[in-house]
Image (cartoon, rainbow, N blue to C red):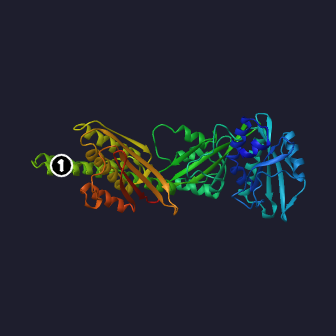
Amino acid sequence: MNDVLSEHTDLDQSAWDWLHLLVSDWQLLADLSFADLILWVPTRAGSWVAAAHVRPTTGVGVFVNDVVGSRIDHTRQRTVVQAYDGPQIVRSHTTTWRDELPVREEAIPVVQGRTAVAVLTRHTNLASMRTPSRLEVTYLATADALSRMIASGEFPNAAAAPASRRGAPRVGDGVLRLDAEGNVTYASPNAVSALHRLGHDDQLVGVRLASALGQVLPERGPVDEELMMVLTGRVPWSTEIESRSAYVSARSIPLSEGGRRTGAVLLVRDVSEVRRRERELLSKDATIREIHHRVKNNLQTVAAVLRLQARRLDDPEARAALAGAVRRVGTIATVHETLSGGWDDTTPFDEIATGALRSAVEISNRSQERVSAELTGTFGSLHAEDATAVAMIVAELVQNAIEHGFATHGGQVTLNAERKTSAAGEDLLQVTITDDGAGLPEGFDPARSGLGIQIVRSFVQDLRGEISWSRVEPHGTQVRFVARLREEG
């Protein structure tokens, strides 16, 4: 729509906004009319072009193909120009035939303030029409009321954007027609069913809706003014009605004629099942977060026990081994701590990587020359299984770089991460740890190295990845590993 408006028209930004507001809510009019709607805008060249098109979900449409971007044909232009110049609603005097279907057409000026900025054409497939039921008569009468409001600039309402929450009601879900006093003049079968689930079993037509529902809704202290305003049709708002047995979403569209309120149409939908599933998902998410939190606490307890054990040992090698175990358990606990603060099974890993670097540098600087570290690139979000493995690999490699590369002097460690996609469509993580320390020892063989390297190789294998060590000139070491990550979903 923006492309059409910018390419073909001289309409200002306020007109753009008004047309966007109309189009965001015109499915309501299409469904009540059982008709296709096309929005025509005047071009710089003096013609008309279709900027938007919507089909009804309550009946058979007219246009099989999308007409957006097409120029108006001469058979329709006269009606459109007459509606625009009026501005007034103009109905074609003759039936139009399209693809062997009889079609009734009507042009409705789209008025902003007091000026027409576009024209809305309504196309009804007469072949699908029959002797109308009371429901269809009510729908069409409501559609005509909305059309008159569009032609007078009273619809759409700039203060009420359409409800976007999941479960927002539409015409097919249930319709109530109210008079100016908030009394029900018509209730569709689906609307009757929705309110029946709230607990209202009596007749709806002829009663004041706010009073009728007020008797079945649970007491909640002060009167809900928003709910009462919606149920009387006085404001173009949406709300949700909750009883002991059901949830019903409701949306009010006030109707007016010449600036005087004449009633309202109320769309309602039973969303009990939708809300039940949402509560189940929230409960599941909360449970998963609590599990991660408890795992983190348990791991921290294990680390504390290992520290106590280490203090009772006289053997330096044994104490160092337990210190390494404490550090590794702490790394895993950090992953679970991050997962406990999220809403899904992924974690923003850059926070964990930054914490691992900071921790390793702080421990090193207590007993050695000054060491600095930095993170470049980004890890992005990783699944929990991948996050634990990558965290262990990164922690071990950074610790090795500091412990063995800077045994006698300070230096710099750089951790770089990059996400890529392989030729086979796999999500790859490439991580490089570079230091300017002493470099690899002569005869270095990863297969015969210490526990830390064996842990790293094991986790790399779990990630279906590869790892390599190389010397950096004039001095230093570079370790690079590539991991194949799990698919998101």
Q: Nearer the viewer, residue 177 or 357?
A: 357
Q: In the picture shown, does residue 462 fall above or below 398?
A: below
Give how far across and how far down residue 78 sits, in percent.
Answer: 90, 47
| Residue at far front of view | 474
| Residue at far bottom of view | 100
Q: Nearer the viewer, residue 210 or 247?
A: 247
Answer whether residue 299 is visible to the viewer in this image: yes
Q: Nearer the viewer, residue 390 or 41?
A: 390
Q: Is residue 354 left or right of residue 138?
A: left
Residue pictured at 83% horizontal, 53% vertical? 105
Q: Which amino acid does label 1 sit on?
A: Ala
Q: Is residue 43 left or right of residue 238?
A: right
Q: Nearer the viewer, residue 100 or 142?
A: 100
Give how far across and how far down residue 449 sits, in percent.
Answer: 25, 57
Answer whether residue 344 is visible to the viewer in this image: no
Give how far across and how far down residue 266 sits, in percent.
Answer: 64, 47
SS of the residue under disc 1: helix
Q: In this view, does 371 lie to the left or right of 122?
A: left
For the image, the number of numbered tags is 1
Dot 1 crowding, Cα within 10 Å, few <14, some 14–19, many 20+? few
Give how far across and how far down residue 474 sits, in percent.
Answer: 36, 44
Q: Name the residue under label 1.
A: 320
